[in-house]
Amino acid sequence: MLFSILDLLKTRITIFFNTIDIEALDSRAEKPRRLRKKAKYAVDHNADFEYRLVNYPADKPETIINIKDAGAIFLQYHRCPLNMPHNRKPNILWISFEDTNPLYGCYGDPVARTPNLDRLASQGKLWTHCFSTAGVCAPARSAVITGMYAISTGAHHQRTTHTHPAAPDLPTPYAAVPPHYVRCFTEYLRACGYYCTNNQKCDYQFDPPLTAWDELGDDAHWRNRPDPDSPFFAVFNPMRTHESGMWPEKCPEPAFDPADMQLPPYFPDTLAVRTAMARMYTHIEESDRELGRLLEQLEDDGLADNTYVFHWSDHGPLPRGKRWPYDSGIHVPMIARGPGMEPGSVSSDLLSTIDLPPTMLSLAGIDIPRHIQGQAFLGKQAAPPRNYVYASRDRHDEAYDMVRAVRDHRFKYILNCRPELPYLLWMPYRNRHPIMQEMWRLHLRGQLDETQSLMFQPPPRPVEELYDTQADPYEIHNLAGHHGYAQELQRLRGALDAWRNDVGDMGLIPENEMVRKWHPGGEQPRTAAPTFIPVTEDSPGIDPAHGGDRLKAPALVQLHSATQGASIAYTLESAKTPRWRLYTRPLRLEPGTTSLRARAVRLGYRESRESRATFTVAD
């Protein structure tokens, strides 16, 4: 059986056998090298031997291999990288902050004290024009974990899984149900050997599926991976920079002098506002130190040279920022360091946080699925720079709204789909913000000037807003009605309409109708429990084996769930909290007795009941 090395380098080959002979014909060698390898079984005794052709570059088409005397061979193809050994695939570390604009020294902020972030930027690359897809947590993070815009998957209403006692008529709680082909992108990494951990923020608008992470929780860390040579994707998300960190009880003694704060012109210059800002900078400084500790751990482990480090945030923290598509709500930092990246480089390319998933797959050498709506900005699958980034705003907590926005390097266009609404809708949680409370106080007294009153202007809102972000970085002067900007208005209006049509804007569907479709009769659907199907020479995978069976070697077991779009996790452990592995291919059963446990899950569905089976295999 002959394979071109070019084909092999694009696939992952899983072979079941006892021994193999490999003959490699390489133009660099004086004569063919002949290797004989004994199959080695994985930790779970799955007997899926993986031989990676690491010594033969793809630019040597004359290189071929012969696989001889392999016995029964099972081939399954995954688009996984084979041009580097298992322990040389790049590791990836994310350190994301909550609710943070790029208020760092490396971005030119004169107040910030961020030595570790500044050092990270000096060692890698900083992007000046990165924007979130939403100005609030859950829709933004849903886009980051799926690579699809929240308005495209039905995850666009902030807080779907929480109840709202003050608004009992909302269709909450519910889990958003993305299309059946959508996955948490970490599954693609896990399927190709990455150990994926999240410490610990999710907030996806659906429960994190069992198949998304090897570890999820306060103790999740790359150091916990069973095989220290396996590549990892590790996420850390310090929580202290969340907007709630500006509540007085969260930071009674700010480390910054309120007098040093630089305020946007739409905030009143009072001690209450300055003190809240000082708390914000205090938490950024504390999170910077936490980032530094993680980078030290990476150095201590000898992993820094082969690890891509990314720092980003989900959105901004302040009133007229968080929950809005103004730059103060969606302009976020993006800093990266890693193999082959030029130290100290700065890029003004437009980025969106939805571009993170495809970029990780590109760096890992994994083909980017076609349904992913972001685009890679690093790696071999990097796309040309963007012309536009997009953002949305819908229901936030108790209050419905619908706003869409598009931005290029200079101009921002905002479409208010509900112009009859005031800017400040009733949101109790937002009104806990000290700056918001101070602004309400001054508004009641008539002590806010025209710019500071922007959020308080009565309806109707303008249907369209247009801002020159270079001349007007705080987006105060709406140019939509100015004749001199008609061409820009028309161009951006067309770009926004095309995007909404392309991604399928589910904001056009009433939320209660969407939920009724997903949860018929008010019941969240449940994923079908996995079924075990043995495959032997006498029984070629026709009948399921409920509870197990007695089999004759050689034997495989397939796992199957009848729910479209389901992913399956399995374990061979009997512990109450075992390590769940992602099922990607039939499992090889060794002679003796093997007990299997399996669960299935589809995004937005309840996890299936656990299936168990015990198989006894005789030689």
Image (cartoon, rainbow, N blue to C red):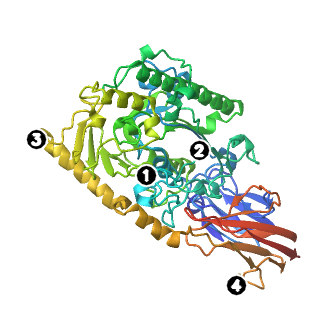
Considering only vertical position in the picture, is 578 above or below 319?
below
Amino acid type, residue under disc 1 in the picture: Gly
Give neighbour class at mark 3: few <14, some 14-19, many 20+ (Cα, 10 Å): few
Q: Answer yes or no: is residue 581 visible.
A: yes
Q: Earlier in the sequence, mark 4 or mark 1?
A: 1
Q: Are marks 3 and 1 in contact (CB under 8 Å)?
A: no
Residue marked by disc 3? 483
Q: Answer yes or no: is residue 590 visible.
A: no
Q: Earlier in the sequence, mark 3 or mark 1?
A: 1
Residue marked by disc 1? 374
Residue marked by disc 4? 542
Seen at 59% across and 53% down, the residue is 186
Residue marked by disc 2? 201
Q: Is residue 558 left or right of residue 452?
A: right
Q: Give the spatial CA distance, label 3 vs label 1.
A: 34 Å
Q: Secondary structure at mark 4?
A: loop
Q: Give the spatial CA distance, label 4 vs label 1.
A: 40 Å
Q: Secondary structure at mark 2?
A: loop
Q: Are marks 3 and 4 in contact (CB under 8 Å)?
A: no
State the quadrant of the C terminus: bottom right
Front position among marks 3 and 4 = 3
Q: Give the spatial CA distance, label 2 vs label 4.
A: 42 Å
